[in-house]
Image: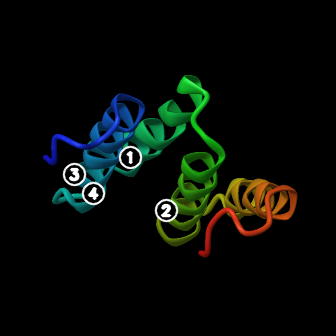
Amino acid sequence: MASNVEAPERWYLALLGFAEHFRTSSPPKIRLCVHCLQAVFQFKPPQRIEARTHLQLGSVLYHHTKNSELAQVAFSVLLCIKARTPGLFNL
């Protein structure tokens, strides 16, 4: 891992790594993946990280579960963040 990664992003990268590991396990452990992604929000991340995590969470929920309503909520929060902060990021 690069040493220039800021401390607040290290926990994000760790949780993201765990989430990806659980998602790609054989068989996939989607519940644990979702828990890791949801844990990101406990740290009150910067908007860029929060938005990206909502995108990832919505994608996992949409593609790997039958809970399309929760996926839609994640995507809706992403769109709200994007509307509040134009130019912050490109998804």
Q: Earlier in the sequence, mark 4 or mark 1?
A: 4
Q: Are marks 1 and 2 in contact (CB under 8 Å)?
A: yes
Labelled disc at residue 33: 1
Residue labelled with disc 4:
28
Judge whether 37 appears above or below 65 on screen: above
Q: Are marks 3 and 2 in contact (CB under 8 Å)?
A: no
Three-letter code, disc 4? Pro
Labelled disc at residue 60: 2
Q: Earlier in the sequence, mark 4 or mark 2?
A: 4
Return the x and y of residue 44 as percentages of the image width and height. 61, 28
4 or 3: mark nearer the eye: 3
Q: Earlier in the sequence, mark 1 or mark 2?
A: 1
Quadrant location of the C terminus in the rendered image: bottom right
Residue labelled with disc 3:
21
Local crowd size for mark 2, using a 10 Å CA cut-off: few (<14), some (14–19), many (≥20): some
4 or 2: mark nearer the eye: 2
Question: Which residue is at the front of the view, 31 or 4?
Answer: 4
Return the x and y of residue 34 as percentages of the image width and height. 47, 45
Return the x and y of residue 11 as percentages of the image width and height. 35, 31
Q: Earlier in the sequence, mark 1 or mark 3?
A: 3
Three-letter code, disc 1? Cys
Return the x and y of residue 60 as percentages of the image width and height. 49, 62
Marks 3/2: CA distance?
A: 13 Å
Local crowd size for mark 3, using a 10 Å CA cut-off: few (<14), some (14–19), many (≥20): some
Local crowd size for mark 4, using a 10 Å CA cut-off: few (<14), some (14–19), many (≥20): some
Q: Earlier in the sequence, mark 4 or mark 3?
A: 3
Q: Are marks 1 and 3 in contact (CB under 8 Å)?
A: no
Please give left or right for residue 78 compared with residue 24 in the image: right
